[in-house]
Image (cartoon, rainbow, N blue to C red):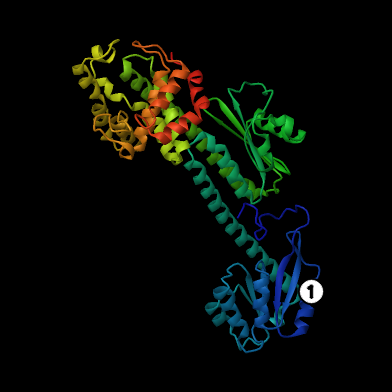
Amino acid sequence: MGLIDDSLEFSDEPTGELAPWKVLIVDDEPEVHQVTRLVLANFRFANRPLQLLSAYTSVEAESQLLEHADTAVVLLDVVMETEQAGLALVRTIRERLGNQFVRIVLRTGQPGQAPEQEVVAAYDINDYKEKTELTAQKLSTTLYSALRAYRDMRTIESSRRGLEVVIRASSEVFSHQQPQHFSSVVLEKLAELIGTETTALCCRIANPCAELPKHFQIAAASGDYSQYVSHNAEEKLPAHVVNSMRQAFSNKQHVFSADHYVLHFSDSDATESLLFVGESQRLDEHGHRLMQVFCSNVAIAYENLHLNQELFNSQLDMVYLLAGAAESRSRETANHVRRVGIIASKIGRLHGLDEATCEMLNYAAPLHDIGKIGIPDAILNKPGAHTPEETVIMRTHTELGSRLLAGSRRPVFRLAGEIALSHHENFDGSGYPKGLAGNAIPIAGRITALADVFDALGSRRCYKEAWPDQEIRRFISDQRGVKFDPELTDLLLANWEEISSLRKQLPDT
């Protein structure tokens, strides 16, 4: 259900041709139908006419109510095919059909068959009238009261249901903490709220100044606008829509137009976003209020997202610096460990690991050599070959790293501990510290081993120069099935150019 629902009414204001109120006349006397129709022929409430439906038995009435679930009022006779057919129909409407909204006005020509006090106490009706007292004026007054009650109940129900939708949509927005998914989720939830297959897009303006930006670049889009991602909105959208975007940006406010909406959001990171929803149904005042609630929640989520991302990036930078320093007691390897994480996650995706595991690889793999923090400088940065005694000490960094990380309750650090312990195991069983072979080596360790060696060979160190690309490729190929998992090696070789390009994107400092 969207904020717009054809079965729910929100406002007395005319917005074009309004659907009539449905009133069901249930009576076994044709004359009653005729008189009622005559009296109510020109009746209007809240600028809407009546649609009068007729039923002559309780069975017919039930059928009509099933077909017209949005019936507002039932004018119901008590005595029809049986002496209490009308009262039985009341129970059917409320209990079996579960319709609590329709207003039931009981009209009886034989009050002795259904005494008012007893009926009102025992049955869920909204009014009780004797046919003799229902003059044209009193019938109109009764109908005004019944329709007003029906409208108000529907408005309350609409608010409840609308708020439920807003809460669900807001919860979904809050649950997405990945910036690349956030805009898409908000666009999707906006379409659900409005209740149509709308086209929508998001423009982001980084570091906006006081003046209007020259371009509004489209960062995310749905529906027909998906093809416009990375294009400028002013080149693809109608002029009146672009004017709304400029108005929203300049005034820092949402803009609700007849056929579209532009929603404005900003955060503490000096970034602003404009969400455009096109081809939308016109919202009434109630719908606008619900949309404003949703927009307020999105603004809070947007702000929290960037605050969390800023904190996360700061923590990640610290991890990279510590991991790089652990390798060589300098900052020269900080980008090496970044690249190892990215390469490991890329190989993981190529191998078919799920996205959550690949994301963890990105953050866990850089910590593969964290145990080197416990290795003396003289051994760690020795320019020549290690002696047998030094090699034994150097190799302890795997177990040191595992002990440092594996005790954590955080899954990413537990994975990092597993990687630290296993990334020097060789596929043929000749590695250390446990001499594991083949699939006995954890997949995260096999992936990180390949990513680490690939990147380390192409990086300059105090004890070596960077290898040429062809020599790295030859070494990797020669070690297929020896040091490295053959399947993972094939994936790296097949995507060599893409993965090699990371050195240019993140060069050593």
| The furthest residue to the left | 389
Query: Is the N terminus in the top left, top right, bottom left or bottom right quadrant?
Result: bottom right
Q: Position of residue 162 (x, y in %)?
A: 58, 53
Q: Nearer the viewer, residue 267 or 226?
A: 226
**Residue at the disc numbered 1:** 39
Q: Does 258 sit above or below residue 210?
A: below
Q: Nearer the viewer, residue 183 or 432?
A: 432
Against 303, is 471 above or below? above
- Quarter occupied by residue 90: bottom right
Query: Is residue 39 left or right of 389 when viewed as pictured?
Result: right
> For the residue carrying disc 1, how many other residues have a C-alpha within 10 Å: few (<14), some (14-19), or many (20+)?
some
Helix, strand or loop at label 1? It is helix
Between 350 and 175, the one lying in front of the other is: 350
Q: Give percent across and percent down for residue 134.
A: 72, 78
Rendered image quadrant of residue 137: bottom right
Q: Which residue is painted at 42% across and 15% down in the image?
A: 467
